[in-house]
Image: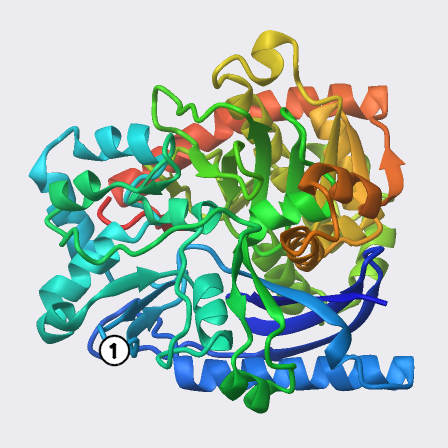
């Protein structure tokens, strides 16, 4: 029996998951990690690579121990391959000796001044870079690298290579500074804003345009390539067998779509977690004329993804539960919220807006259009309204992406089915609301945390266990339930979407004027 291991360096935790060739999860271990704030720099989120590596080794050891207990024998020798995934946008910087010298998590927000500096170079620079890279200054590496140059000059002089967190895991597993392999792949590398979408590799012209050195970008390799093998040193630290193959992984959302079996052109997926991502596959590296949405390289070679992000739906839901529902179980809240009619009796929420990547900000959080009728407007009404608000934003994202390059509704190719994964997909109520709001069938998979499964599929492909990624994904990914839209509720949500758009606009204008506070706005705005 062959087993495959996925290692996931997420924003809030690291985990190791072991699957068999059929995609069945055998064992897993996860540990939270915490990012340090440097008191000198508001918004900073430094990554501790020493503690992070120790936690990674602990997860691997624990996953192997659990799998051995289940199988009745040590299975380390039967791990056919390992691949890695991670939070996107997080950076690790190295010196010439291969030592990590600086790292930040994807939630790092210290580079406000540097975004302003980049915008001052040229009024059209951000748009020009977007059409080459698919990225704006809102999330990418350019402001953070410029921050290192401005604020940590000595580190900047020592800087030799730039990498992402999934690449760092492979680097460490293959030996680290003692001969480890550092390869940056396009699915996560493209989120830096320094990759060319067409060539799927570093674009040094972008770095030069932004005043960044062009000699800090190393080798690249496509997802699924063989990167190296587990070193003797790493094997001793984490319990793996020396020589176990290491396969180039990818970004969490891109590998997540593989784990859902969504690998075809126009295939669409929604990942519902702390943030909600709407992803659509394309065989063309096109960008939007108004720079409104993000475009990333897919982990499937020769494919790209259009991406639209909704800020904080899962965090808003958790806040409401803990602040007003005494930490009640979500399933209990769902049961009562299901008794509230579609449209939440006319209540309107403003939280996340539809994505505008180059001018990205959100109105102040608010609940509106309710009265003091306790039967109509109680905590379950508010709870359901949060669900509906998120679905309305997702409707906006579906429509936004449909206007890109002939994909979607503008060409009568709107997805007939969208796969819905992540923690929110565990809610039957939320799944039905999304189906009704988008007036589209929603498929909920058996494995809802799909990034690890997609990473395992990539590992198997890299060592020849699967002939190609799409066929393996289709075979392994299984759908648990289909939610079909209800015509009556779909009509209600269609009207609610128009109302929400009308209400949101003046709320955003109030925040822009400073009368209220933005829920979030991109650095430099």
Residue 74 appears at what percent x and percent y? 81, 85
Q: Is residue 460 visible?
A: yes
Q: Nearer the viewer, residue 18 or 513?
A: 18
Above or below, 187 against 317 in this view is above
Q: Secondary structure at mark 1?
A: loop
Residue 12 appears at what percent x and percent y? 53, 70
Above or below, 244 against 386 in this view is below
Q: Residue at x 41, y 42 (%)?
A: 362
* Image-based side of 65 in relation to 15, left or right: right
Q: Residue at x 65, y 87 (%)?
A: 239
Q: Nearer the viewer, residue 278 or 510?
A: 278
Q: Residues within 10 Å of mark 1 (few under 14, many from 20)?
A: few
- Picture quarter with the N terminus: bottom right
Q: Is residue 370 visible?
A: no
| Residue tagged 1 | 97
The quadrant where residue 395 appears: top right
Q: Residue at x 66, y 73 (%)?
A: 16
Color theme of the render: rainbow
Q: Nearer the viewer, residue 4 or 514?
A: 4
* Image-based side of 97 in relation to 180, left or right: left
* Image-based side of 387 in relation to 24, left or right: left
Residue farthest to the top? 411
In the rendered picture of this protein, how many numbered marks are placed on residues?
1
Residue 41 appears at what percent x and percent y? 22, 72
Residue 423 appears at what percent x and percent y? 71, 56
């Amino acid at each position: 029996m062959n087993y495959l291991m996925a290692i996931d360096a997420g924003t809030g935790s690291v985990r190791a998951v072991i699957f068999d060739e059929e995609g069945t999860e055998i064992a897993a271990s996860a540990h939270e990690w915490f990012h340090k704030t440097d008191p000198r720099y508001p918004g900073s989120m430094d990554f501790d690579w020493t503690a992070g590596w120790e936690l990674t080794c602990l997860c691997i050891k624990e996953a192997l121990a659990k799998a051995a207990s289940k199988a009745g024998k040590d299975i380390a020798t039967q791990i056919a391959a390992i691949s890695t995934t991670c939070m996107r946008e997080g950076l690790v910087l190295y010196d010439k000796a291969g030592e990590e010298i600086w790292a930040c998590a994807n939630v790092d927000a210290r580079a406000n001044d540097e975004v302003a500096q980049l915008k001052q170079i040229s009024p059209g620079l951000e748009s020009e870079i977007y059409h080459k890279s698919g990225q704006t200054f809102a999330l990418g590496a350019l402001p953070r690298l410029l921050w290192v140059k401005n604020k940590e000059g000595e580190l900047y002089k020592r800087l030799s290579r730039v990498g992402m967190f999934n690449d760092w895991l492979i680097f460490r597993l293959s030996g680290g500074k003692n001969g480890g392999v550092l390869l940056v792949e396009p699915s996560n590398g493209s989120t830096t804003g320094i990759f060319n979408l067409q060539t799927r590799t570093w674009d040094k012209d972008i770095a030069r345009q932004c005043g960044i050195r062009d000699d800090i970008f190393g080798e690249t390799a496509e997802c699924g390539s063989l990167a190296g093998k587990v070193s003797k040193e790493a094997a001793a630290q984490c319990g793996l067998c020396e020589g176990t193959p290491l396969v180039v992984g990818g970004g969490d959302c891109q590998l997540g779509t593989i784990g859902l079996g969504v690998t075809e052109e126009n295939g669409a997926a929604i990942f519902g977690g702390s943030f909600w991502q709407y992803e659509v596959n394309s065989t063309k590296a096109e960008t939007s004329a108004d720079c409104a949405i993000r475009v990333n390289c897919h982990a499937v070679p020769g494919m790209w993804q259009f991406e639209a992000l909704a800020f904080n739906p899962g965090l808003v839901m958790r806040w409401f539960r803990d602040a007003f529902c005494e930490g009640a179980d979500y399933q209990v809240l769902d049961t009562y919220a299901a008794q509230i009619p579609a449209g939440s009796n006319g209540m309107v929420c403003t939280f996340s807006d539809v994505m505008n990547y180059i001018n990205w900000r959100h109105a102040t959080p608010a609940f509106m259009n309710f009265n003091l009728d306790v039967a109509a407007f109680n905590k379950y009404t508010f709870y359901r309204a949060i669900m509906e608000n998120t679905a309305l934003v997702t409707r906006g994202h579906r429509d936004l992406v449909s206007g890109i390059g002939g994909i979607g509704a503008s060409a009568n190719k709107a997805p007939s089915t969208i796969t819905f994964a992540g923690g929110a997909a565990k809610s039957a109520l939320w799944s039905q609301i999304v189906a009704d709001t988008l007036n589209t069938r929603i498929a909920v998979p058996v494995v809802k945390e799909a990034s690890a499964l997609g990473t395992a599929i990539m590992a198997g492909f890299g060592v020849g266990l699967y002939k190609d990624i799409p066929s393996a994904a289709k075979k392994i990914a299984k759908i648990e339930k289909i939610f079909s839209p209800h015509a009556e509720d779909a009509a209600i949500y269609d009207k609610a979407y128009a109302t929400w758009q009308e209400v949101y606009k003046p709320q955003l204008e109030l925040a822009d004027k400073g009368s209220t506070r933005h829920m979030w706005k991109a650095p430099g705005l």
